[in-house]
Image (tube, rainbow, N blue to C red):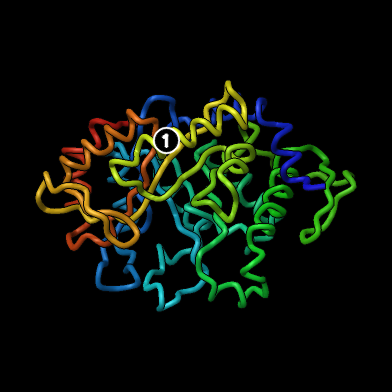
Amino acid sequence: MDMSDTFARADTTATTIQLESHPGYSRVFRPRELTIGLILPLETHPEMPHPTMRDHISMAQRAESLGVAALWARDIPFYDPAYGDAGQIFEPLIYIAQLAAATRNITLGTTGIVLPMREPLLLAKQVNSLDQLTDGRVVIGMSSGDRPSEYPLFGIDFETRGERFRDAYGVYRNVSERAFPQFTSARFGRSTGELDMLPKPPYGRTPAIAVGRSQQTLQWIAENMDGYLGFVPDPSELRSFAEKWRNLTQSEANTAAFKPLAFGGFLYLHPKPDHPFTRIRGGFAIGSRALRDFLEQARDAGVSHVALNPRVTPRPYVEILDELGSIVLPAFLPQ
Protein backbone atom coordinates (compact mmCIF):
# COMPACT_ATOMS: atom_id res chain seq x y z
CA MET A 1 0.00 0.00 0.00
CA ASP A 2 1.25 3.53 -0.81
CA MET A 3 0.78 5.07 2.62
CA SER A 4 1.74 8.55 1.43
CA ASP A 5 -1.23 8.74 -0.94
CA THR A 6 -3.64 7.16 1.57
CA PHE A 7 -2.67 9.48 4.41
CA ALA A 8 -2.83 12.69 2.39
CA ARG A 9 -6.20 11.96 0.81
CA ALA A 10 -7.77 11.02 4.11
CA ASP A 11 -6.89 14.37 5.70
CA THR A 12 -7.52 16.88 2.91
CA THR A 13 -10.69 18.50 4.28
CA ALA A 14 -9.58 18.84 7.90
CA THR A 15 -6.18 20.27 7.10
CA THR A 16 -7.59 22.82 4.68
CA ILE A 17 -9.54 24.38 7.57
CA GLN A 18 -6.39 24.45 9.69
CA LEU A 19 -4.33 26.04 6.94
CA GLU A 20 -6.70 28.99 6.75
CA SER A 21 -5.57 29.96 10.26
CA HIS A 22 -1.87 29.39 9.63
CA PRO A 23 -0.28 32.88 9.65
CA GLY A 24 2.50 32.13 7.17
CA TYR A 25 0.19 30.45 4.71
CA SER A 26 -2.60 33.02 4.92
CA ARG A 27 -0.15 35.91 4.49
CA VAL A 28 1.05 34.50 1.17
CA PHE A 29 -1.94 32.59 -0.22
CA ARG A 30 -5.43 34.10 -0.39
CA PRO A 31 -8.21 33.45 -2.92
CA ARG A 32 -8.46 36.02 -5.75
CA GLU A 33 -5.35 37.87 -4.54
CA LEU A 34 -1.65 37.78 -5.41
CA THR A 35 1.37 38.42 -3.21
CA ILE A 36 5.07 38.80 -4.00
CA GLY A 37 7.95 36.92 -2.44
CA LEU A 38 11.71 37.00 -2.94
CA ILE A 39 14.00 34.02 -3.38
CA LEU A 40 17.20 34.29 -1.34
CA PRO A 41 19.88 35.56 -1.33
CA LEU A 42 18.81 39.20 -1.22
CA GLU A 43 21.85 40.15 -3.23
CA THR A 44 22.68 40.49 -6.91
CA HIS A 45 25.70 38.61 -8.23
CA PRO A 46 25.21 38.05 -11.97
CA GLU A 47 28.90 37.42 -12.68
CA MET A 48 29.69 35.29 -9.61
CA PRO A 49 28.30 31.92 -8.51
CA HIS A 50 28.49 32.77 -4.80
CA PRO A 51 26.87 35.70 -3.00
CA THR A 52 28.87 37.53 -0.34
CA MET A 53 25.86 37.48 2.05
CA ARG A 54 26.78 40.97 3.22
CA ASP A 55 23.89 43.01 4.64
CA HIS A 56 21.56 40.04 4.27
CA ILE A 57 19.74 40.68 7.54
CA SER A 58 19.16 44.37 6.82
CA MET A 59 17.92 43.47 3.32
CA ALA A 60 15.45 40.98 4.80
CA GLN A 61 14.17 43.63 7.20
CA ARG A 62 13.88 46.14 4.36
CA ALA A 63 11.96 43.67 2.23
CA GLU A 64 9.53 43.06 5.08
CA SER A 65 9.00 46.78 5.63
CA LEU A 66 8.20 47.28 1.93
CA GLY A 67 5.49 44.62 1.95
CA VAL A 68 7.23 41.55 0.54
CA ALA A 69 5.06 38.63 1.64
CA ALA A 70 7.66 35.86 1.86
CA LEU A 71 11.35 35.03 1.74
CA TRP A 72 12.22 31.70 0.13
CA ALA A 73 15.43 29.75 0.80
CA ARG A 74 16.78 27.22 -1.68
CA ASP A 75 18.20 23.81 -0.74
CA ILE A 76 21.59 23.34 -2.47
CA PRO A 77 23.81 21.00 -0.43
CA PHE A 78 26.82 21.21 -2.77
CA TYR A 79 28.07 23.75 -5.30
CA ASP A 80 28.23 22.35 -8.83
CA PRO A 81 30.21 24.62 -11.22
CA ALA A 82 28.16 23.24 -14.12
CA TYR A 83 25.14 25.05 -12.66
CA GLY A 84 27.03 28.17 -11.54
CA ASP A 85 24.68 28.83 -8.64
CA ALA A 86 25.06 28.19 -4.91
CA GLY A 87 21.81 29.75 -3.70
CA GLN A 88 22.06 31.53 -0.36
CA ILE A 89 24.91 29.16 0.72
CA PHE A 90 23.52 28.63 4.23
CA GLU A 91 21.50 25.51 5.02
CA PRO A 92 17.89 26.67 4.51
CA LEU A 93 16.26 25.61 7.77
CA ILE A 94 19.07 26.99 9.91
CA TYR A 95 19.02 30.22 7.92
CA ILE A 96 15.25 30.52 8.32
CA ALA A 97 15.74 30.36 12.09
CA GLN A 98 18.07 33.36 11.96
CA LEU A 99 15.76 35.30 9.66
CA ALA A 100 12.84 34.59 11.99
CA ALA A 101 14.74 36.17 14.87
CA ALA A 102 15.50 39.28 12.79
CA THR A 103 12.00 39.84 11.32
CA ARG A 104 8.48 40.06 12.70
CA ASN A 105 5.74 38.84 10.34
CA ILE A 106 7.13 37.89 6.94
CA THR A 107 6.54 34.30 5.84
CA LEU A 108 9.66 32.15 5.65
CA GLY A 109 9.75 29.23 3.26
CA THR A 110 11.82 26.93 1.09
CA THR A 111 11.92 26.53 -2.68
CA GLY A 112 12.35 23.77 -2.08
CA ILE A 113 13.73 21.24 0.35
CA VAL A 114 15.14 18.38 -1.77
CA LEU A 115 12.98 15.77 -0.12
CA PRO A 116 14.54 12.59 -1.58
CA MET A 117 17.86 13.57 0.04
CA ARG A 118 16.31 14.30 3.46
CA GLU A 119 15.55 11.86 6.26
CA PRO A 120 11.81 12.57 6.76
CA LEU A 121 11.66 11.83 10.50
CA LEU A 122 14.34 14.38 11.33
CA LEU A 123 12.90 16.80 8.78
CA ALA A 124 9.52 16.62 10.51
CA LYS A 125 11.16 17.39 13.86
CA GLN A 126 13.04 20.36 12.37
CA VAL A 127 10.05 21.83 10.53
CA ASN A 128 7.61 21.38 13.42
CA SER A 129 10.11 23.05 15.75
CA LEU A 130 10.59 25.99 13.37
CA ASP A 131 6.87 26.44 12.90
CA GLN A 132 6.32 26.40 16.67
CA LEU A 133 9.17 28.81 17.41
CA THR A 134 8.00 31.26 14.73
CA ASP A 135 4.31 30.93 15.67
CA GLY A 136 3.32 29.64 12.28
CA ARG A 137 5.43 31.65 9.87
CA VAL A 138 6.89 28.66 7.99
CA VAL A 139 5.77 27.23 4.64
CA ILE A 140 7.80 24.29 3.34
CA GLY A 141 8.28 23.95 -0.39
CA MET A 142 9.48 20.49 -1.40
CA SER A 143 11.18 19.35 -4.59
CA SER A 144 12.90 16.29 -6.01
CA GLY A 145 16.08 18.18 -6.96
CA ASP A 146 17.43 18.80 -10.44
CA ARG A 147 21.19 18.27 -9.99
CA PRO A 148 22.21 14.67 -10.75
CA SER A 149 25.74 15.31 -9.49
CA GLU A 150 24.55 15.63 -5.88
CA TYR A 151 22.81 12.27 -5.62
CA PRO A 152 25.89 9.98 -5.63
CA LEU A 153 27.28 11.86 -2.61
CA PHE A 154 24.22 10.74 -0.67
CA GLY A 155 24.30 7.21 -2.08
CA ILE A 156 20.87 7.72 -3.66
CA ASP A 157 19.72 6.71 -7.12
CA PHE A 158 18.77 9.81 -9.12
CA GLU A 159 16.39 7.88 -11.35
CA THR A 160 14.18 6.74 -8.46
CA ARG A 161 13.89 10.15 -6.78
CA GLY A 162 10.20 10.41 -7.67
CA GLU A 163 9.35 7.22 -5.77
CA ARG A 164 11.58 8.29 -2.91
CA PHE A 165 9.81 11.67 -2.80
CA ARG A 166 6.40 10.01 -2.33
CA ASP A 167 7.73 7.63 0.30
CA ALA A 168 9.45 10.39 2.28
CA TYR A 169 6.42 12.68 2.02
CA GLY A 170 4.09 10.03 3.41
CA VAL A 171 6.34 9.39 6.39
CA TYR A 172 6.91 13.11 6.97
CA ARG A 173 3.20 13.91 7.02
CA ASN A 174 2.38 10.92 9.19
CA VAL A 175 4.86 11.55 11.99
CA SER A 176 4.48 15.33 11.77
CA GLU A 177 0.74 15.49 12.24
CA ARG A 178 -0.53 12.26 13.82
CA ALA A 179 -0.29 11.32 17.48
CA PHE A 180 1.58 8.04 18.00
CA PRO A 181 1.77 7.41 14.24
CA GLN A 182 1.91 4.03 12.60
CA PHE A 183 3.65 3.54 9.28
CA THR A 184 5.81 1.15 7.29
CA SER A 185 8.23 2.52 4.72
CA ALA A 186 10.52 0.71 2.30
CA ARG A 187 13.22 3.30 2.95
CA PHE A 188 12.55 5.21 6.16
CA GLY A 189 11.73 2.71 8.88
CA ARG A 190 8.48 1.75 10.55
CA SER A 191 6.41 2.67 13.58
CA THR A 192 3.95 0.54 15.54
CA GLY A 193 2.42 3.59 17.26
CA GLU A 194 4.25 3.25 20.58
CA LEU A 195 6.24 6.49 20.14
CA ASP A 196 5.16 10.02 19.38
CA MET A 197 7.01 12.97 17.89
CA LEU A 198 6.93 16.34 19.63
CA PRO A 199 6.33 19.15 18.97
CA LYS A 200 3.41 19.00 16.60
CA PRO A 201 2.76 21.90 14.19
CA PRO A 202 1.14 24.84 16.04
CA TYR A 203 -1.76 25.07 13.58
CA GLY A 204 -2.23 21.37 12.90
CA ARG A 205 -0.05 21.29 9.79
CA THR A 206 2.93 23.17 8.47
CA PRO A 207 1.85 23.88 4.87
CA ALA A 208 3.80 21.86 2.29
CA ILE A 209 3.77 22.89 -1.37
CA ALA A 210 5.39 21.26 -4.39
CA VAL A 211 8.15 23.28 -6.05
CA GLY A 212 8.20 22.08 -9.62
CA ARG A 213 6.66 18.75 -10.56
CA SER A 214 9.00 16.79 -8.21
CA GLN A 215 8.75 13.85 -10.63
CA GLN A 216 5.03 13.63 -9.89
CA THR A 217 1.91 14.22 -11.93
CA LEU A 218 0.02 17.44 -11.33
CA GLN A 219 -2.91 15.28 -10.30
CA TRP A 220 -0.85 13.68 -7.50
CA ILE A 221 0.30 17.12 -6.33
CA ALA A 222 -3.28 18.44 -6.38
CA GLU A 223 -4.46 15.47 -4.31
CA ASN A 224 -1.63 15.29 -1.80
CA MET A 225 0.01 18.68 -1.29
CA ASP A 226 -1.12 22.11 -0.12
CA GLY A 227 -0.22 24.06 -3.26
CA TYR A 228 2.01 24.17 -6.32
CA LEU A 229 4.80 26.54 -7.34
CA GLY A 230 5.73 26.09 -10.98
CA PHE A 231 8.01 27.78 -13.49
CA VAL A 232 7.20 31.25 -14.84
CA PRO A 233 4.72 30.97 -17.74
CA ASP A 234 4.67 33.33 -20.70
CA PRO A 235 1.93 36.01 -20.48
CA SER A 236 -0.06 34.23 -23.18
CA GLU A 237 -0.04 31.02 -21.10
CA LEU A 238 -1.21 32.48 -17.78
CA ARG A 239 -4.84 31.49 -18.12
CA SER A 240 -4.15 27.94 -19.31
CA PHE A 241 -1.52 27.59 -16.56
CA ALA A 242 -4.09 28.52 -13.91
CA GLU A 243 -7.06 26.70 -15.45
CA LYS A 244 -5.23 23.37 -15.57
CA TRP A 245 -4.43 23.61 -11.87
CA ARG A 246 -7.90 24.85 -10.94
CA ASN A 247 -9.56 21.99 -12.80
CA LEU A 248 -7.36 19.45 -11.04
CA THR A 249 -7.87 20.84 -7.56
CA GLN A 250 -11.63 21.03 -8.03
CA SER A 251 -12.10 17.57 -9.54
CA GLU A 252 -9.31 15.53 -7.98
CA ALA A 253 -8.90 17.06 -4.52
CA ASN A 254 -11.76 18.77 -2.72
CA THR A 255 -14.22 21.09 -4.42
CA ALA A 256 -14.40 23.26 -1.29
CA ALA A 257 -10.65 23.49 -0.84
CA PHE A 258 -8.48 26.43 -1.85
CA LYS A 259 -5.15 25.09 -3.06
CA PRO A 260 -2.95 27.92 -4.25
CA LEU A 261 -0.99 28.19 -7.46
CA ALA A 262 2.29 30.12 -7.65
CA PHE A 263 5.25 30.53 -9.97
CA GLY A 264 8.83 31.64 -9.57
CA GLY A 265 12.20 32.09 -11.21
CA PHE A 266 15.01 34.51 -11.99
CA LEU A 267 14.09 38.15 -12.56
CA TYR A 268 16.19 40.54 -14.64
CA LEU A 269 14.59 43.84 -13.67
CA HIS A 270 15.18 45.88 -16.82
CA PRO A 271 16.16 49.55 -16.40
CA LYS A 272 13.38 50.58 -18.81
CA PRO A 273 10.13 50.35 -16.77
CA ASP A 274 8.01 49.41 -19.79
CA HIS A 275 10.35 46.75 -21.18
CA PRO A 276 8.09 43.79 -22.09
CA PHE A 277 8.31 40.23 -20.80
CA THR A 278 11.32 38.50 -22.35
CA ARG A 279 12.36 34.94 -21.60
CA ILE A 280 15.82 34.39 -20.09
CA ARG A 281 17.42 31.21 -18.78
CA GLY A 282 15.64 30.22 -15.59
CA GLY A 283 13.21 33.13 -15.61
CA PHE A 284 12.39 36.38 -17.38
CA ALA A 285 13.45 39.97 -18.00
CA ILE A 286 10.92 42.77 -17.64
CA GLY A 287 10.59 46.42 -16.63
CA SER A 288 8.94 47.37 -13.35
CA ARG A 289 5.73 48.83 -14.83
CA ALA A 290 5.43 45.91 -17.22
CA LEU A 291 6.02 43.56 -14.27
CA ARG A 292 3.16 45.16 -12.37
CA ASP A 293 0.87 44.66 -15.38
CA PHE A 294 2.04 41.06 -15.84
CA LEU A 295 1.34 40.24 -12.20
CA GLU A 296 -2.09 41.84 -12.41
CA GLN A 297 -2.82 39.50 -15.33
CA ALA A 298 -1.52 36.58 -13.26
CA ARG A 299 -3.74 37.54 -10.32
CA ASP A 300 -6.80 37.82 -12.57
CA ALA A 301 -6.00 34.38 -14.02
CA GLY A 302 -5.93 32.83 -10.55
CA VAL A 303 -2.26 32.84 -9.52
CA SER A 304 -1.82 33.51 -5.79
CA HIS A 305 1.91 34.17 -5.41
CA VAL A 306 5.07 34.89 -7.37
CA ALA A 307 8.56 34.20 -6.01
CA LEU A 308 11.19 36.37 -7.71
CA ASN A 309 14.96 35.95 -7.69
CA PRO A 310 16.61 39.17 -8.96
CA ARG A 311 20.18 37.92 -8.42
CA VAL A 312 20.80 38.12 -12.21
CA THR A 313 20.03 41.85 -12.36
CA PRO A 314 23.30 43.85 -12.62
CA ARG A 315 22.25 46.51 -10.09
CA PRO A 316 22.58 46.88 -6.31
CA TYR A 317 19.85 44.92 -4.55
CA VAL A 318 18.72 47.95 -2.58
CA GLU A 319 17.89 49.74 -5.85
CA ILE A 320 15.81 46.77 -6.97
CA LEU A 321 13.94 46.69 -3.68
CA ASP A 322 13.23 50.41 -3.84
CA GLU A 323 11.94 50.17 -7.41
CA LEU A 324 9.73 47.22 -6.57
CA GLY A 325 8.57 49.06 -3.47
CA SER A 326 7.58 52.18 -5.37
CA ILE A 327 6.05 50.68 -8.52
CA VAL A 328 5.11 47.02 -8.04
CA LEU A 329 4.58 46.05 -4.41
CA PRO A 330 1.87 48.63 -3.53
CA ALA A 331 -0.54 46.78 -5.82
CA PHE A 332 0.06 43.42 -4.11
CA LEU A 333 0.52 44.02 -0.39
CA PRO A 334 -0.17 41.18 2.07
CA GLN A 335 -2.76 41.74 4.78
**Image position, residue 260 (x, y; %):** 48, 34
Q: Is residue 174 above or below residue 23?
A: below
Front residue (pair 80, 135): 80
Picture quarter containing residue 323? top left
**Image position, residue 175 (x, y; %):** 75, 45
Query: Callout 1: 10 Å neighbours few (<14), some, many (20+)?
Result: many
Picture quarter containing residue 256? top right
Front residue (pair 255, 98): 255
Q: Residue shown at 63%/44% (left/top)?
A: 128
Left or right: residue 97 compared with residue 253: left
Q: Secondary structure at mark 1?
A: helix
**Image position, residue 75 (x, y; %):** 50, 61
Q: Is residue 237 above or below residue 318?
A: above
Residue 104 in sight from this viewpoint: no
Number of marks present in the image shown: 1
Front residue (pair 183, 334): 183
What kind of residue is marked 1?
Answer: Ala
Front residue (pair 180, 160): 160
Instruction: Name the image quarter holding the C terminus.
Output: top left
Q: Is residue 136 above or below residue 170?
A: above
**Image position, residue 204 (x, y; %):** 65, 32
Q: Residue shown at 50%/42% (left/top)?
A: 228
Left or right: residue 266 compared with residue 80: left
Quick one: which residue is furthest to the top in this view? Answer: 256
Left or right: residue 246 compared with residue 51: right
Residue wearing tag 1: 242
Residue 265 in sight from this viewpoint: yes
Left or right: residue 304 compared with residue 327: right
Quick one: which residue is furthest to the left in this view? Answer: 272
Q: Residue shown at 59%/41% (left/top)?
A: 219
Q: Residue shown at 30%/31% (left/top)?
A: 333
